[in-house]
Image (cartoon, rainbow, N blue to C red):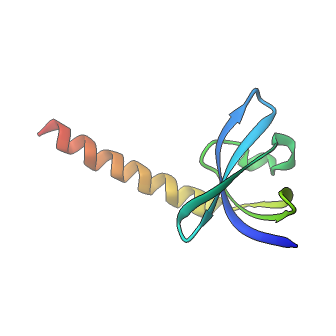
Amino acid sequence: MTESATAVLDRIVDEQKAVLLLESADRVVDELVVNVETLPEVGRREGAVFDVSIDDGSLVEATYRPEETRERRETARERFDRLSERLDE
């Protein structure tokens, strides 16, 4: 049975394996290790967000979501900036 999920590229190991964190309701619920080549080239970097299809624990398809990736980066940057301002006080 094929499942759909949102996945975030957590890290790349030995330039060959990508560790994807699978999310549900904005929480990490699992992780999946795949060959980097199975991901769209444009999204092969940490923090990239994908819509993925998984069948029996294997990646079937990954679609890069550039807007979601950008939004998450901006949110993280804003959060870091707010924390930095508090430390400067």
Residue placed at 81% from the left, 50% from the top?
A: 39
Picture residue at 36% right of the left edge, 52% below the top: 78
Q: Nearer the viewer, residue 56 or 17?
A: 56
Q: Position of residue 46 (x, y in %)?
A: 62, 42
Q: Position of residue 85 (x, y in %)?
A: 21, 43
Up-down: is 41 above or below 28?
A: above
Image: 29 above or below 17: below
Q: Is residue 78 above or below residue 19?
A: below
Residue 49 placement, left or right of 71: right
Q: Could you tell me residue 73's position as x and y percent? A: 50, 52
**Which of the 4 image quadrants contains residue 37?**
top right
Image x and y of residue 32, in percent: 74, 50
Asked if residue 43 lies left or right of residue 85, the reply is: right
Instruction: Give the residue at x 26% y 45%.
Output: 83
Res 10 → quadrant = top right
Quadrant in the picture for the C terminus: top left
Residue occupying image coordinates x 40% and y 48%: 77
Quadrant of residue 53 within the rendered picture? bottom right
